[in-house]
Image: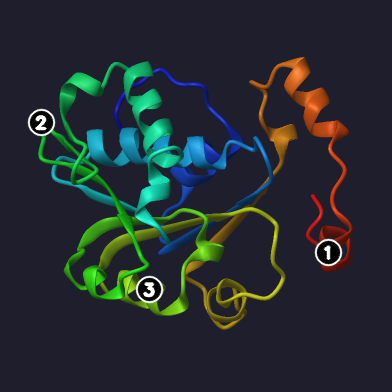
Amino acid sequence: MANVDIEVTKNFNFLRSLQDKFIAILEGSTRSTKTYSIIQHLIIDKCLADPGHVVRCFRFDSVTHNKTTIKDFKEIMLKINAWDLGRWNGTDKEFKFHNGSLFAFEGTSNEQKLHGCKQHTAWLNEVMEIPADAFAQISFRTSDRIIMDFNPSFNHHWVFSEVMTPDRDDWAYQHSTYKDNSFLTPQQIRSIEKYEPTTANKKAGTAD
């Protein structure tokens, strides 16, 4: 693991502590740090610490990476002074580290393109939007670990019926809320606590 000074969170410690689980599942509501902590872990413990490590972050639509995962990735890379340790290719949406590691951002809407994607670590961001067939193709081509994250918005999904099942022992689960984020400002906390879940959320049991 690389020696980098960062703001440690519950989710980061969870990912760093995993040993033999192929799938790591993080469920969390607004500002629970799941996305930020996943990126920190993948940069520091994978790309920087393991030369040649390939990370691919998947969303259903690759265009949505620009204002979400890529934005956070660049922010963290600059914050830990790692942006100069490689080169960013905006066209291909990938960062190539000088040590041979790769952090790439992909879409799953075209399943045929997944057949050429091989990686050590796959991160399925907002996994509830990703089809089960896409997950299968990604899984076939991932050698080390799959990380999934999602907001509490569904009760019925292939993640629950095909992955988080009693007959599988290759996954680990972590739940977090804004209360696990010690870096929020008082104003951010007040804004979150004023938010009232919709009636649909309450009926579905997904209000958090």
Element type where label 1 sits in the image:
loop
Residue at the spot 29% in from the left edge and 42% down from the top edge: 46
42 or 2: nearer the viewer: 42
Residue 160: quarter of image: bottom right
Please say if 87 is above or below 183. Answer: below
Residue identifier under label 1: 205
User: Residue 49, image x and y in percent?
Assistant: 24, 35
Looking at marks 3 and 2 on the same chain, the residue that comes earlier in the sequence is marked by 2
Query: Left or right of 1: which side holds 181?
Result: right
Looking at marks 3 and 1 on the same chain, the residue that comes earlier in the sequence is marked by 3
86 or 13: nearer the viewer: 86
Q: CA distance from mark 3 to mark 2?
A: 30 Å
| Tag 3–tag 1 contact (CB < 8 Å) | no
2 or 40: nearer the viewer: 40
Please say if 163 is above or below 100. Answer: below
> On residue 98, which mark appears?
2
Query: Left or right of 32: which side holds 56?
Result: left
| Tag 2–tag 1 contact (CB < 8 Å) | no
Q: Quadrant of the N terminus?
A: top left
Looking at marks 2 and 1 on the same chain, the residue that comes earlier in the sequence is marked by 2
Q: CA distance from mark 2 to mark 1?
A: 46 Å
User: Residue 128, image x and y in percent?
Assistant: 56, 64
Q: Badge 3: few (under 14), some or many (20 or more) residues near its Cα, within 10 Å?
A: some
